Amino acid sequence: MISIKRVYTPPSPDDGTRLLVDRLWPRGISKEKAHLDGWLKDAAPSDKLRKWFGHDAARWPEFEKQYLAELAQQGERLLLLFQAYNKKNITLVYAAKDTGHNNAIILKEYLDKNLTKAKP
């Protein structure tokens, strides 16, 4: 099971493996307080795309389209990485204030769709 959570929300035992999926380290939080098992910068949008989006909800549809294209380019390498973690619950951790428009939402949907296909 894959879920998403803001890095500023306290962790819980149900989180399982907690993976930061942002390109930049979240402001004002220490590594100890974040309780992360990994930081997957390559699963985050490119710097160019991240800066263009700027958390502007009006750009969400185009951001989603471009980010999915970036994820598709990583293809099997990315899926293999998540399959290795997929032995228990995974929580994709992000820092954005907007809980309805952030890369973790798109990444979760991508993984839910593609990891199911990739399973034997």
Image: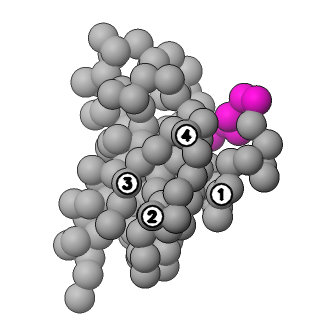
Separation of marks 4 and 1 at Cα, in angstroms: 12 Å
Q: What element carries label 1?
A: loop
Separation of marks 2 and 3 at Cα, in angstroms: 10 Å
Separation of marks 4 and 3 at Cα, in angstroms: 13 Å
Query: In terms of sequence position, does the residue under pointer 2 or pointer 3 come before the other?
Result: 3
Query: In terms of sequence position, does the residue under pointer 1 or pointer 2 come before the other?
Result: 2
Magenta span: chief secondary structure? loop
Q: Which of marks 4 and 1 is in front?
A: 4
The residue sitting at 30% across, 11% down in the picture is 58
Q: Quadrant of residue 119?
A: bottom left
Q: In this view, does 42 lie to the left or right of 88?
A: right
**Residue 25 location, x and y as percent?**
71, 38
Q: Read off the residue under disc 2.
A: 14
Q: Read off the residue under disc 1.
A: 36
How many residues crowd mark 2 within 10 Å: few (<14), some (14–19), many (20+)?
A: few
The magenta span reads: 22-28
